Image: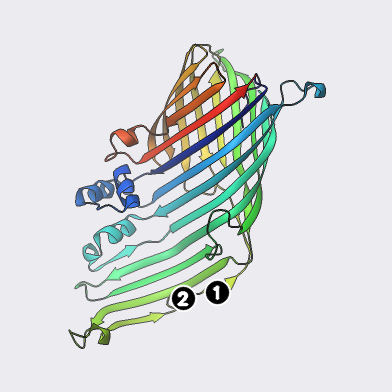
Amino acid sequence: MNSDTTIRCAAGVFANYDVGSNAITNSFINKFYSGQFIDSTQKSRVRNKLTNNNRLGGDVNGGIFYMQKLDSATHHKNVSWFVSAKSRQHINMAFSRDLFNVAFYGNDGYKGQTADFSGFNMSLVQYQQFQAGLCSDRFGVGLSVYNGQQFMMLQAKTATMYTSTFGDYIDFKTSYSMITSDQAHTNPGAMNGIGTGLDFYARMPLQLANGQKGDLFIQLADFGFIHWNSQTNHYKNDTTFHFDGFVVKNAFQLADSSVHYSAKNVINAKPYQQTSYASYLPATLDVKFVPSGIKYQCVIGIRYRFVSDYNPYGYGQFRYHFGKKYTLVAEVGYGGYANFQSALTLQAKFNNGMSIHLGTNNILGYIIPDYTCGQGAFISFSKTFR
């Protein structure tokens, strides 16, 4: 929502992505995503950062918006209405140290031991958002309708794998549940669910104990849900699996070979039921204090995302205004998915009403990707008419 009420109307486009983890480095993410070879040095850097409980999350968004002042005849000179359309995607994951080690090093290091994958969860949601609302320099509210494109949630309450001392067999146990939207229709625009949501912000004058005057901003975004249709697949199982290798009857006819295993309630590819499901979106609450200032401002704030493994994120910003056309924003913070983050933003306004807003949520992710665990970039273009 845009709160600049000095303009008559405005239109623009925007896009951003953001990904972070407490342990997975940027170089590892980049190579994994692009399918490149991940060498032992890169895996070792991740391994040294792992804790018992690790997280990874990210977002990809893009859209368009239009805003216009209400007719002066309504006696609301500082109030505007707006509409927007967005494509949204969010991923969230929590995993153990043992899961990473087995996935990328194998189970040789766990001979005579049990690897614990318990607490693993992963969720993915893709949707389109259509929003309309009112805003001013003091408040804003937007109501949204969501089209649910794709949803997946996997949770393993317990999951362990024991490797025998000589590595001649493994025992795997898990209790898991998984929910997926209709996998036959996952293309952009697929209508697998529908939902509603609310965005809200308020700006209130505030004077601190030391006499510093400014404004307190409170913003709640993506407070909503999506109701997925009756073709939603539900899986749930408790599984015990014992594997002790292959039996090769004929070295020249591998088709005659067999796998030796025993299993109880082996994972079944078919859902145990298909029924509707409601999922909440990862709403964001952002609270910040912006002191009064013409040339520069030092902002402090805290941000939190619900229904995710996102840690509370505290941050400080330094804003420097180069006249009325340019603003540079430098930010440092700690928390979220990536722990330490350093952001840099440039805003430029031109005489013809065009403006550009571009930056990165973690500039160190591009400078030293081997040692940092978060990256993100955003850009927007808009045209105003006064």
- Give the secondary structure at mark 1: loop
Name the quadrant of the C terminus: top right
Q: Residue at x 65, y 41 (%)?
A: 131
Query: Which residue shows up at 38% across the image and 71% down it?
Result: 173
Horizontal side of 122 relative to 132 (left or right) equals left
Residue 378 in view: yes
Q: Is residue 261 above or below residue 4?
A: below
- 301 over 255 or under it: above or below: above
Using the image, tell me which numbered label, if any, was put on residue 252.
none
Q: Rate crowding at label 1 as few (under 14), some (14 to 19) or many (20 or more) other CA atoms within 10 Å.
A: few
Pick the residue in front: 245 or 33: 33
Task: Name the one closer to the observer, 290 or 29.
Answer: 29
Whether tag 1 and tag 2 are in contact, CB under 8 A, the answer is yes
The residue tagged 2 is: 268
Give amino acid for label 1.
Tyr
Q: Secondary structure at mark 2?
A: loop
Q: Amino acid at mark 2?
A: Asn
Residue neighbourhood size for the residue with mark 2, other residues' Cα within 10 Å, grouped as few (<14), some (14–19), many (≥20)? few
Give the image location of residue 233, x and y in percent: 56, 67
In the rendered structure, the answer to whether residue 115 lies left or right of residue 265 reads: left
Q: Which residue is mark 1?
A: 272
